[in-house]
Image (tube, helix red, strand yellow):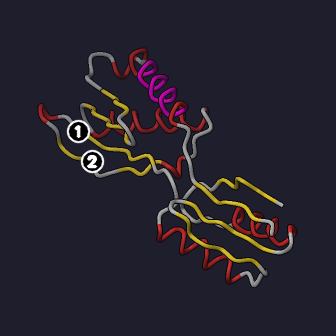
Amino acid sequence: MPSFDIVSKVEMQEVDNAVNQTVKEISQRYDFKGSKCEIKLEKDAIKLLADDDYKLKAVVDILQSKCIKRGISIKSLQYGNVEPASGGMVRQAVDIQQGISKEKGKDIIAVVKESKLKVQAQIQDDQVRVTGKNRDDLQDVIKLLKGKDLGVELQFVNFRD
């Protein structure tokens, strides 16, 4: 039976490159002269530290533009709350979403079932597997899911006949 997997993965090397480009641009920009803005890439998060809200928003904007240029979807970045830090600075954590959560998996399965196509969808860890007897039905599911905005960036991999 033909099948494919729906995943949501982010290439961490590209995230690292985007963070490094952001750090470089911040060090060169005139409006950041003398400020203590920091960006640190941790395991599955990016930590932002800036002098005030304005500079933090500018850092987020630069980071987003660099991510887009590197081919990283903005949907995979989950922004935390802006928190005050020591010395009158502000801090924000940006989580990098890897995989499809159970709730999003259930949403994907609901969309597939609503379509009335003759396919089965099941959650497997952090991915969703769709199987069916007909390859055309699977391609219709891919087209359907690409047209929907489910809040996560979806990739369709492991298409097998």
Q: Is residue 138 left or right of residue 77?
A: right
Residue 12 place in picture, x, y as percent: 50, 36
Residue 44 place in picture, x, y as percent: 39, 42
Along the line of sight, which residue is nearer the eye, 105 or 79? 105
Task: Give the crowd class for mark 2: few <14, some 14-19, many >=20 residues within 10 Å.
Answer: some
Task: Give the crowd class for mark 1: few <14, some 14-19, many >=20 residues within 10 Å.
Answer: some
Along the line of sight, which residue is nearer the eye, 131 or 83? 131
In three-dimensional space, the C-alpha distance between marks 2 and 1, rounded to whole angstroms, equals 7 Å
Q: Are marks 2 and 1 in contact (CB under 8 Å)?
A: yes
Q: Is residue 84 left or right of residue 35?
A: left
Q: Is residue 87 left or right of residue 64?
A: left
- Label 2 vs 1, first from the N-terminus: 2
The residue sitting at 75% across, 69% down in the picture is 141
The residue sitting at 12% across, 34% down in the picture is 86
Q: Which mark is residue 129?
A: none
Q: Which residues fall within the magenta stretch?
A: 14-25
Q: What residue sits right under mark 2 in the picture?
A: 82
The residue sitting at 64% across, 77% down in the picture is 111
- Residue 79 colored magenta? no
Quadrant of the image occupied by residue 140: bottom right
Residue 1 place in picture, x, y as percent: 80, 69
Q: Which mark is residue 90?
A: 1
- Residue type at tag 1: Val
The answer to whether residue 23 is above or below residue 86 is: above
The residue sitting at 77% across, 64% down in the picture is 143
